[in-house]
Amino acid sequence: MALMHLTVIPLGTVSPSVGEYVADMQIILEKSGFPYKLTDMGTIVEGSSKELLVLAAKLSELPFNKGIQRVVTQINLDDRRDKKAALGDKILSVAARLTQEGRG
Amino acid sequence: MALMHLTVIPLGTVSPSVGEYVADMQIILEKSGFPYKLTDMGTIVEGSSKELLVLAAKLSELPFNKGIQRVVTQINLDDRRDKKAALGDKILSVAARLTQEGRG
Amino acid sequence: MALMHLTVIPLGTVSPSVGEYVADMQIILEKSGFPYKLTDMGTIVEGSSKELLVLAAKLSELPFNKGIQRVVTQINLDDRRDKKAALGDKILSVAARLTQEGRG
Amino acid sequence: MALMHLTVIPLGTVSPSVGEYVADMQIILEKSGFPYKLTDMGTIVEGSSKELLVLAAKLSELPFNKGIQRVVTQINLDDRRDKKAALGDKILSVAARLTQEGRG
């Protein structure tokens, strides 16, 4: 199972604000059925790496529909096969470790 | 003000689990005084880009103290000077936009 | 047309050296038919963003075939529709600009 | 010794072309004295990770001097202490491996 961290950046917008493009992405994410989480620096989605990259292709296409001519997309995939790694697991695991070590 | 998204990946660990290195980072982050948030795919920190890159240098050094010989660090900086962009702001802003447009 | 910058990082290798995995990728890249260039920090490939992400899925799968249990993949896509942006173009363009401005 | 892959992306430019900002960066890189290489998808620089992150802070500041209000910077650091990893080494190493294995 994989987690994907994705950022889609439209270039050549008149304003430095790109919130409307992020909002468009969230509509597609809702429909996709994948568990996902919006963060301040990108969106994290859970699925198989193959499915996630197909989704990424869809999401990075969106700004072109609004007349944008250039889009930079950053994708980070963390794919592990030794154990389940659902959205939220890593954070719980680090917190538990710190508590256990008396460092949390 | 800038937001930094940071991932520190030790290479050559015997196990594919790297949770102990993430826990070490969190100790330094706590002491740093910067607002930060741990996510499934990295840590987001708020500060000036100059300060954040100094912090990143400190954090990417940590695995070497445990005998690791190679560390890959990914840093994404989003630095804006037109408006305040504190940790949490962007998410609120996108949610508000979707609600306003009747899409949320 | 898009350019993709890709890095595939296997975790949990005993050694910090990952050259054999890079070599495996290069075999697939040769067969793919896409123009590509190996750099010190990743591979750059030229194609449509949809095709490139399908290729990325293939390449990030490779280490699992060798018993690796966790793979981190970093993908950067620069997709532009206003002009052709083939491999090598940007470098030529920056060099020309610097020469023109008397700064090169 | 570390290699840094860096991309500095100004947001809110009227045009999707950002070549002038890349050219500005190259002037600073020349003066820095660090070995570097411009690629289609970013610049690769060789140095200690601490020095490289100080340089990155300088480079990501540049677009603000031209009135840009928001800059996204992507930094990838590959820092290894087990062997020398100068600019160019990895490519030579992969090529040698493929030749040796009769695959190149």
Image (cartoon, coloured by chain):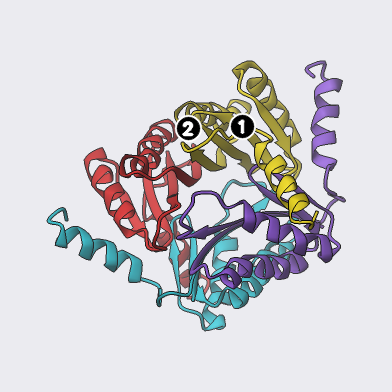
Chain colours: A cyan, B red, C purple, D yellow
Q: Residue at x 46, y 36 (%)?
A: D81
Of D97 and D40, nearer the camera is: D97
Residue B60, position in %: x, y?
40, 41
How would you rate the neighbour count of disc 1 (Cα within 10 Å): few for under 14, some for 14-19, many for 20 or more? some
For badge 2, the amino acid type reads Ser
What's the chain of the residue with tag 1? Answer: D
Marks 1 and 2, how far apart in space?
A: 13 Å
Task: Name the N-terminal-most of marks 1 and 2.
Answer: 2
Of B21 and B93, nearer the camera is: B21
Asked if residue A72 can be seen in this view, the reply is no
Asked if residue C46 lies left or right of residue B79, the reply is right
Query: What residue would you read off at disc 2?
Result: D49
What's the chain of the residue with tag 2? Answer: D
Query: What residue would you read off at disc 1?
Result: D86
Q: Quadrant of the N terminus of chain B?
A: top left
Given this view, does label 1 or label 2 mark the residue nearer the observer?
1
Q: Residue at x 66, y 74 (%)?
A: A54
Asked if residue C100 lies left or right of residue A11, the reply is right
